[in-house]
Image (cartoon, rainbow, N blue to C red):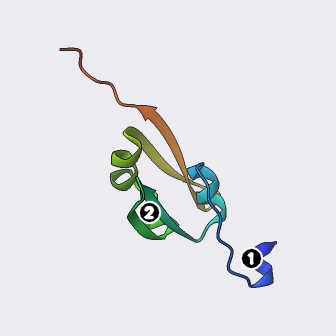
Amino acid sequence: MIRSLGFTTIVVLHDLNLAARYCDHLVLLNEGEVVRSGPTADVLVPEVIEPVYRMKVKTFMEEECVQLIFRPKVFSQS
């Protein structure tokens, strides 16, 4: 609905799947620093997200938008 009004809208989301579904452009921050900025499909890729969230992530396309599944990294016990 907002897109049809022709306004630029800025939102803050911590749920990346919501961001993938509703946003055209993202700015990913880590500790106050911009990690990546650009179209959603360019920002929500494993090589960008995994170092920030320190988790493995699998991405796939569903209904014309990126969907993410996070899973904790398995650390070896030495």
Query: What distance separates the C-alpha of mark 2 from that of mark 1?
Result: 20 Å
Q: Position of residue 38 (x, y in %)?
A: 46, 72
Residue with the most extreme front position: 32
Which residue in the structure is indicated by mark 2? 43
Q: Amino acid at mark 1?
A: Arg
Query: Residue 3 has which mark?
Result: 1
Query: Residue 31 has which mark?
Result: none
Residue 54 lies in quadrant = top left
- Which SS class for mark 2? helix
Residue displayed at 61% across by 62% down: 64
Q: Amino acid at mark 2?
A: Val
- Which SS class for mark 1? helix
Residue displayed at 68% across by 80% down: 8
**Residue 55 placement, left or right of 22:** left
Q: The C terminus is located in which quarter?
A: top left
Compared with 16, 22 (above or below) is below
Q: The N terminus is located in which quarter?
A: bottom right
Compared with 75, 10 (above or below) is below
Neighbour class for label 1 at 10 Å: few (<14), some, many (≥20)? Answer: few
Neighbour class for label 2 at 10 Å: few (<14), some, many (≥20)? Answer: some
Residue displayed at 59% across by 71% down: 24
Q: How many marks?
A: 2
Q: Position of residue 4 (x, y in %)?
A: 79, 80
**Residue 67 placement, left or right of 28:** right
- Do the residues under discs 2 and 1 have CB atoms within 8 angstroms? no
Between discs 2 and 1, the one toward the N terminus: 1
Residue displayed at 74% across by 76% down: 3
**Residue 39 placement, left or right of 62:** left
Residue with the most extreme left position: 78
Compared with 63, 58 (above or below) is above
